[in-house]
Amino acid sequence: MRQDWFKALCLALLIILIIVLCLEAADRIFFRPKSIFARTVSDFESKKSGVEVLFLGQSDMQFAIIPDRLNYSAYNFAAASENFTETYYKLEHYIKDMPNLKIVVLPLNFQSFSSYRADILQWEYFKYGYISNSDLRDLYRLKGAVVLREKLISFCPIVRGIEMIDFMRNIKKLFTIQNIEKTEMSKGYLKYTGSDVTRDSAVKRASRHFKGNNIFNEDFLLYFEKILKLCADNNIKVFILTLPVTDFYIEQAKQYVDKDVFYNKALDNPQYSKYIYKHLDLLEIYAGNHDLFLNSDHLNYNGAAKVTDIVAAELSR
């Protein structure tokens, strides 16, 4: 009886494994190359040798800078939820193949060092080779088993809930003949129009970013410095950009973060400031103009056009 039970269990596990591997293979073949991340990387790699100005960071930067409005060969290589650890390894991976790179633009907002993302290393950064095996050892000493978990997931990301949800959505699009590559992109910039700014959404966003979290996570401060040093070693100037957010978001964020204290710790500190060429603070410039925002802390296309033009003027100086 026990042998029959054990055989049935093994058979069930084998069937589940085969199903998961089939789903993973289908996702890799049909959908993953059409994801925002994959399309951005593919486009960037075809242009990287000529890029003079590189924008890095997370989604707030990805939505905010339109490279086609700059008078330089520029690329917006930001990615959703990217933290400074991931930014460092991505930049290190490509920097030797970018002989014309003169300026790196990094975002610095209140949530940039928040520990709410400290236990995450997205599987794409392993998949695309940004984090090597030697890097993995260093990260393990710093972060522990979480690094091994993300490395293992990178072999079969479909097992993550969010990846499975995306997969099922894409299956639905495939069978209803909808365009999977829906998001409009240009040199890494994601174009979004419209506006849905509410105080409630700002409360939720700020609570997620700050409540119960360490505002200055030591790992992120370490990798912020490593990015600055990497650029200095390659004669690349670092331009720090604080992007606009709405008054609703500022109102909530100030309950957790003091602006002067934040800038003193992150920018005025001689440990970092000696590597920073310029800081442009646009945090409150459009705070009350909600029509320029997609949500409480991301710009829409109209807002991005205004911010890009300001940044372009500053770079020209």
Image (cartoon, rainbow, N blue to C red):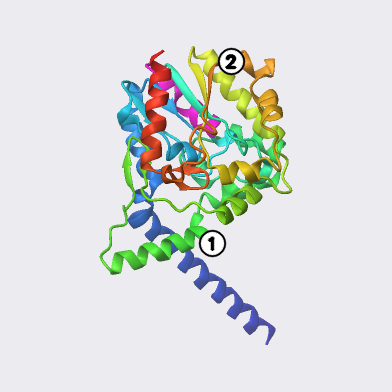
Pick the front one: 254 or 265: 254
Q: Tell me which amino acid carries mark 2.
A: Tyr
Q: Is residue 283 magenta?
A: no
Specify the farthest residue to the front. 288
> Closer to the observer: label 1 or label 2?
2
Left or right relative to 197: residue 309 = left
Q: Position of residue 126 (x, y in %)?
A: 52, 41
In this figure, what is the number of numbered marks? 2
Q: Position of residue 225 (x, y in %)?
A: 63, 23
Point out the stretch of residues depicted in magenta: 87-101
Pick the front one: 32 or 250: 250
**Residue drawn at 47 percent across, 40 percent down:** 79
Q: Which residue is mark 2?
A: 275
SS assignment at label 2: loop
Is the C-beta separation of discs 1 and 2 under 8 Å?
A: no
Q: Indicate whether 58 appears above or below 165.
A: above
Examine the image and state in which quarter residue 112 appears.
Answer: top right
Q: Say which mark, if any, is on residue 147.
A: none
Q: Position of residue 18 (x, y in %)?
A: 47, 67
Q: Indicate whether 224 appears above or below 159.
A: above
Q: Is residue 89 magenta?
A: yes
Q: Which residue is mark 1?
A: 161
Pick the front one: 291 or 37: 291
Specify the farthest residue to the left. 177
Sequence-wise, the earlier of marks 1 and 2 is 1
* Viewport quadrant of the C terminus: top left
**Residue drawn at 32 percent across, 42 percent down:** 185
Q: Residues within 10 Å of mark 1 (few under 14, many from 20)?
A: few
Pick the front one: 189 or 137: 189
Res 119 seen here: no
Res 146 seen here: yes
* Viewport quadrant of the N terminus: bottom right
